[in-house]
Image (spheres, rainbow, N blue to C red):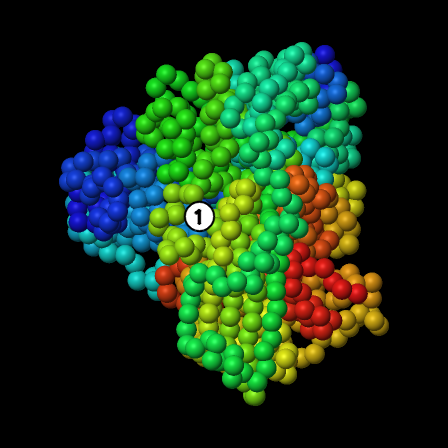
Amino acid sequence: MITLNVNGKPMSVDADPDTPLLWVLRDHLGMTGTKYGCGMALCGACTVHVSGQPARSCSTSLAAVAGKRITTIEGIGQTKEGRVLQEAWIANDVPQCGYCQSGQIMSAAALLAKVKRPTDAEIESAMSGNVCRCGTYNRISLAVRQASRNLK
Amino acid sequence: MNEFGIINLSRRDFLKAGAGLTLGVTVPSLAQMPGQGGRSVVAAGALEPNAFVRIGTDNTVTVIVKHLEMGQGTYTGLPTLVAEELDADWGQIRVEGAPADASRYNNLFLGALQGTGGSTALANSYEQMRKAGAAARAMLLAAAAERWNVAPDSITIARGAVMHLPSNRRTNFGQLAASAAKLPVPKEVQLKDPKDFALIGRRVTRTDSRAKSNGTAIYTQDVKLPGMLTALVAHPPRFGGKPKSFDAAKAKAVKGVVDVVAIPQGVAVLAHDFWSAKKGRDALAVEWDESGAFKLGSAEIMAEYKNLAATPGLPARKEGDLPGAFARAAKTLEAAYEFPYLAHACMEPMNCVVKLSADACEIWNGEQFQSIDQPEVAAVLGMKPEQVKLNMLFAGGSFGRRANPHADYLVEAVQIAKGIDGRAPVKLVWTREDDMRAGHYRPMYYHALKAGLDAQGNIVAWQHRIVGQSILAGTAFEGMMVKDGIDATSVEGAANLPYAVPNLGVELHSPKMGVPVQWWRSVGSTHTAFSTETFLDELAAAAGKDPYQVRRTLLAKSPRHKTVLEMAATEADWTTPLVSARVGDRRGRGIAVHESFNTVVAQVAEVTVKRDGSYRVDRVMCAVDCGLAVNPDVVRAQMESGIVYGLTAAMYGAITLKDGVVEQSNFHDYMPLRMNEMPRIGVYIARSSEKPTGVGEPATPVIAPAVANALFAATGKPIRSLPIRIQT
């Protein structure tokens, strides 16, 4: 048994320590908001926060996050950054197929937690690890800027 | 049933359904279309549960949407049509995906078939959904008139409120639903005059944005059934390979692995979870039978295509006297174009959940083509198509991929479930690598173009020869859409070249290759728009003419093309020269226009080429004529989306084969465009009161030629193969 703290709740998992956090969340804890896209940390669909830092859960082992504080898309709305981002995402109808958007919002939330008023270059740099095949990038960057303005 | 086929389903199903008003619509003229097999007109009193609208006593309006939501906005657009005629409040609208039943949910542009594709979802539903809403409104209004004992025309309905203003009485749909359900369906309904539209033509927010922003939207990948096993499949390394033998001992030794079964497509490892199945598959030893495997590489395929292009193909279009025109031409130009295979690479790799029972098969899927999937799955199981229940979930992208003409990944999932005798529900998951290497690509193509100019630089002769695999050969659509050897999807965009050229010939070679191919967002236009639109710029340059003005002249009789062309050029300030930001940078502007799926799109792209040969697309101005824009913001989103999808392919997209083995596997070698490479995009929608036409695909084919023409303008060197490589 390995214990994690997910969205503020302690959780115990009986899985091999080499199991990626992504599959621990999805298959063992039933939290499916975090998505599988590539399995190689290339697309960012699986982005979560580990101790407040953005991490690609497909390439982060369970062993590496034992005892750590993990935030997922299911919990990010409880933070002020997550809340303004989700509001901005809806206001701008950012999602199309939507499959990458959990990861997009998690990357954006990590950025805003660190830099409240990011420049366009900082947004680009923080978000370029997240792939969207529907091409919602311009709306994502618009929504991040809007959320940043709404962040008290 | 009344004359246009609205059925009050709730009269029969009232008790069973709980409460409320349920309406369905059929369109007899389509039911009567020839070639529909045994299907007859829905008989009077048949009461097929042909539901599109359900009004609950809780005052919700549920719209049953027959088309897959894969990002393009069907779960917003179709409900908008219902809500408009119903005078519902947008906030009370709920959405449900339709079950598989082509007798009720067929795509009116595809005859009797149920499926989503060809940018038809909103266009084919435009009147059908409005009628469904209007009929429901009429019944609610009649119920209110009866309840209040007032004349129906004294009642007002607006934003979900039903009001009798003279007596200041007010109610809502929910309170009227039960009594409305007992009333007859009106014989005919009056649709609104477009000038009275309250929702159509305006932005309403997407119905799926919230669920897709908080992780609650459910995709196939997220389905979990009790006792369900996750299956990963070891596939043969080459197309046409089969498993010969395998050793499952090591795979079965992996904790969590439950079973290993051979299926025609490979060897499946089943486990309690993905990671165990993955480790099991990694441990599996399979020997492949490659006697029927395809072993050519991309270079050999292209060499074969080049040879074919030197010989005449089958005629797809023939006008005027081509040999005579070439003989008289003052100048002749030739160019050849090469296009690679392309993968769809949806963010959600292909997957499917199957649950078998003795007399039924239930499937959860980003379901795009019910009328193919039901019979294909049924054939594997020896069932009737109607025994296959299809649950249509959100799809994490498709771009054509999930409408597989052979139901490839569904059949694979069903084979696995069958392989374990249906003892547990099965979720088939393809890894990114499986998905990338599974074929069903946009085909490779080779185009040879030749044109003749007269002394004034006018185009007097145009010969276009296309070489590439037929997408429709061997599919259920072959009989319908392959005529005299011409696959309509191989030549679309070329055979209907909009330019006024007096002598014109388009020819096609359709060689057979062992690589499975499929429609890919905008299908034939993905290559025909590129070769025709870049060749035209080469001709304009040879004649010393402005490529925008050349198009305007040649499109004098194509008003929709001309309008969007002029809009894009105006927005781009076409006549004002571009300024270089840095010394040594070269800038260029390119224009392209193309019609696909009855929608015309023009784009102007601006590029900067740096001294090291790298380039970036700075800005794209996109003008579209899609008839009436039901939701202008969704239209804008689809233009943006199409541009990014097409630009990704133009800059990076190539699936290549070496000795029959696909060389790419994941996003590091099949690169997607990322945010740091994004151009600014402006979308301009032409005013139109014509019926809406599709927007999911038509922006895609235009961006590559617009960018290539911009690079040509910047460097003086034409781009004749994709993905783009700049010669330094």
Element on which disc 1 rests? loop
Q: For the view shown, which residue lies furthest in the right direction?
A: B583
The answer to whether residue B213 is above or below residue B615 is above
x and y percentages locating residue B487 in the rendered image: 43, 54
Q: Is residue B643 left or right of residue A120?
A: left
- Of the residues shown, which amino acid type is indicated by label 1? Leu
Q: Is residue B224 left or right of residue B152?
A: right
- Measuring 61% from the left and 26% from the top, which residue is drawn there? B288
Q: For the view shown, which residue lies furthest in the bottom direction?
A: B455
Res B681 visible = no
x and y percentages locating residue A21 in the rendered image: 71, 26
Res B593 visible = yes
State which quadrant residue B66 falls in. top left
- Of the 4 image quadrants, the one containing the N terminus of chain A is top right
- Measuring 70% from the left and 30% from the top, which residue is drawn there? A58
x and y percentages locating residue B167 in the rendered image: 24, 50
- Measuring 68% from the left and 23% from the top, which residue is drawn there? B282
Q: Chain of mark 1?
A: B
Q: Is residue B159 left or right of residue A17?
A: left
